[in-house]
Amino acid sequence: MTPHNHPSHTHRHHHGHGSEAKLVFSIFLNLMISITEIVGGILSGSVALLSDALHNQSDTFSLVASFVGVRLAKKGKTESMTFGYKRAEILIALLNSSILLVTSLYLFKEAFFRFIHPVSINGPLMIGVALVGLVANLSSVLLLREEAAHSLNIRSAYVHLIMDTLSSVAVVIGAMLVMLFKVYWIDGLFSILISAYVLWGGYKVLWEAIGILMHNVPKSIDLSQIKNDILAIQGVKDIHHIHVWNLTDKDVHFEAHVNVAETATMKETNHILCNVQKLLKEKHHITHTTTQIESGLCVGASLTPRPE
């Protein structure tokens, strides 16, 4: 007996055509910021602007991933794609973070040499370009603020935009210091700080994406506690073949074999199943479960017996 318990979708879907339009406009804004800062960084000689351009480009990828996620979520399941296209976002995040890490390492190296050997920078041009980036980033934040409250997918891109807005503030401050005090080494210092931040952010996204693709147990799940809780249910003899994984960054799946007494009736096993599913949903917030009830079928399985 292997019942499946699927999550009920009672929430409202706020991320419709309005969200898609806002995401497309935000993508356009961030592309313009990146192009402007790349050109401005080259003309002014500011590595900080180039570093911030990289950060903006990562936001663009993040927004594209959110847009793709919203569109693919509408496609649903097929006979060949029984889980649908939910993991497309994870694959995009893996690719995006990998490119981000390689590029940020290169810019980190360039920023370090610029810090050791400062060069003259066009302060007014640098601050002008930085202000354009700040205004555009802040506009994207305000644009997606309402949508982020209803969608974790969009919220992830929204957090990126908030961080990039703070990064743009740092570039503006650095540009003012360069223009007022001619401290050109500050450009290298700010470049190192921005690159380090982008490197750390890219690493976290990469590690999380790899963990999901490798079916790691989610960090929010205490597997030992789940085992003990299920074993405490009346009628459960032991539990084995436990698997807990993320399908996406928010969808947690659980499967296990639960051993019951050979004399257990159908009514009793159904009662045990209901208790297991209720426990997982209410205490551990896992709503997608597959539980196989058996009585000594898995010979040689590593069993987790009920504690004495």
Image (spheres, rainbow, N blue to C red):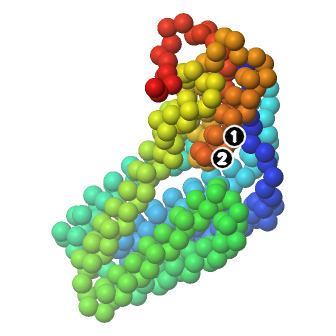
- Quickly name the residue at label 1: 278
Q: Are marks 2 and 1 in contact (CB under 8 Å)?
A: yes
Spot occupied by residue 176 in the image (x, y as percentages of width and height): 36, 88
Q: CA distance from mark 2 to mark 1?
A: 6 Å
Towards the viewer: 74 or 236: 236
Query: Type of residue at label 2?
Result: Glu
Toward the left, the furthest residue is: 116
Mark drawn on residue 282: 2
Spot occupied by residue 32 in the image (x, y as percentages of width and height): 58, 69
Query: Type of residue at label 1?
Result: Lys
Few, some or many residues within 10 Å of mark 2 (<14, 14–19, 20+): few
Mark 1 secondary-structure assignment? helix
Spot occupied by residue 2 in the image (x, y as percentages of width and height): 72, 21
Q: Looking at the image, which residue is at 78% across and 35% down? A: 77
Image mark count: 2
Side of 79 where 57 appears, left or right: left
Residue 107 in sight: yes
Corner quadrant of residue 19: bottom right
Residue 233 vertical position relative to residue 133 in the rendered view, above or below: above
Few, some or many residues within 10 Å of mark 1 (<14, 14–19, 20+): some
Mark drawn on residue 113: none
Toward the bottom, the furthest residue is: 180
Side of 227 where 5 appears, left or right: right
Mark 2 secondary-structure assignment? helix
Towards the viewer: 213 or 50: 213
Residue 99 vertical position relative to residue 85 in the rendered view, above or below: below
Q: Looking at the image, which residue is at 34% across and 81% down? A: 174
Toward the front, the furthest residue is: 308
Corner quadrant of residue 273: top right
